[in-house]
Image: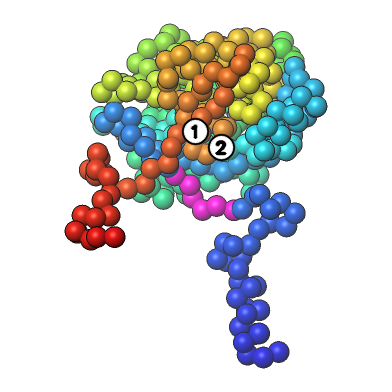
Amino acid sequence: MTYRNLLLAALISSAGIFGYSQPEGNPGLALQGPDHYSFEVGDVKVTALSDGSVPQDLHILLRGTTEAKTDALLQRSFLTNPVEASINAFLFRTEDRLVLVDTGAGEFFGPGFGDKLLSSLAAVGVAPDQITDVLLTHAHDDHMGGLVHGGKLTFPNATVHLSKADLDFFMDRENAKRTGYAMSYFDQASTALEPCIKAGKVKAFTSDGEVAPGVFAAQHPGHTPGTTFYTLRSRGEEIVFIGDIIHVAAVQAPDPEITIAYDVNPAAAAAVRREALSTFAEERTLVAVPHLSFPGVGHFRRMGSGFEWVPIAYGNREPGSDGRFADPHKNGDKH
Ligand SMILES: [Zn+2]
């Protein structure tokens, strides 16, 4: 082997370190770094934070469809089963509060799946003890899991807001027997929420209303008994953090009647989806969605008898350069 070939071999073997190697047999899946994406809603900078992604076998998980129908809808969006579901959380500052909407899966999914939220948070210069409020859209593992690590509070200074309906339902194991909903959900709720309850950090709400300055909670039972939308308003603009009223845009937007195994009340979940997506389409509402492809922010528009997901446009330039287009001739160059 010549010196040059040795050098090449060394470069190729270290390609993984530099991040250009693909996991074998999965060419569409590359490992990313800490992911964050910021945009403005009125005066408020909102940042989507990735907790990672997990594969989902839709043939097993979806209800009210057939494998053939699911596959046809996926193919329309250039996807094949299983699909990768993002786990997104969202951060913003309102007055003196630093608010996190959902906390990702924490340690629940095991090594390699989720639990990237803290590194995404670190990448935007935020330490966990700076978070003052956590807003849970609902009490499922992939939204509250990040509240604890090794049984200790991840965000020691944060008040955890969630609906009393979800808190009561998931903290009572009798509900597993009553409803047939898997016991694992109730075990996970104790793991994540009990340390927060013991520390006096949980603030459960029974009625809709303001939970932080300019942030309004509204319950939409279906996916869980107290699934909550949080609307952030600033200077006439708004964004709604909608939780898990939709998991797979390619399938459930065109046909909102298709439900998922995680729905506590599938009929109510489907009704909420159809009604909410209809309102969002009509009012052109910006929404933030935990499981649509990162950053999971965009709009729904009507398409036939259903809807279509339109992700927000990408932006990346210095603040304060609003309203000016780059002029290639500004130095008087003639081309
Ligand atoms: Zn979820």
Which residue corresponds to the image point at 58% horizontal and 19% vertical from the top-left?
303
Give the overall secondary structure of the magenta segment. loop
* Residue 112 visible within the image: yes
- Quarter holding the C terminus is bottom left
Q: Is residue 11 above or below residue 273?
A: below
Residue 179 x/y as whole percent? 71, 12
Magenta region: 31-36
- Quarter holding the N terminus is bottom right
Q: Is residue 334 above or below residue 99?
A: below
Was residue 182 drawn as part of the magenta stretch in this picture? no
- The residue under label 1 is which amino acid type? Pro
Name the element at disc 2. loop
Asked if labels 1 and 2 touch by Cβ distance under 8 angstroms, the answer is: yes
Question: On the rendered structure, is 137 left or right of 231?
Answer: right
Residue under label 2, please give it: 293
Determine the CA span between mark 2 and mark 1.
Answer: 9 Å
User: Which of the pair 317/41 is nearer the observer?
Assistant: 317
Which residue corresponds to the image point at 49% horizontal and 33% vertical from the top-left?
311
User: Which of the pair 22/242 is nearer the observer?
Assistant: 22
Cβ(mark 1) to ligand 1 < 8 Å?
no
Q: Is residue 150 above or below residue 60?
A: below
Name the element at disc 1. strand
- The residue under label 2 is which amino acid type? Ser
Question: On the rendered structure, is 99 left or right of 305?
Answer: left
Which residue corresponds to the image point at 60% horizontal and 31% vertical from the top-left?
141
* Residue 102 visible within the image: no
Closer to us: mark 2 or mark 1? Answer: 1
Residue under label 1, please give it: 311
Residue 168 x/y as whole percent? 56, 14
Q: Is residue 108 above or below residue 249?
A: below
Residue 49 x/y as whole percent? 46, 40
Say which label, 2 or 1, has the lower sequence index: 2
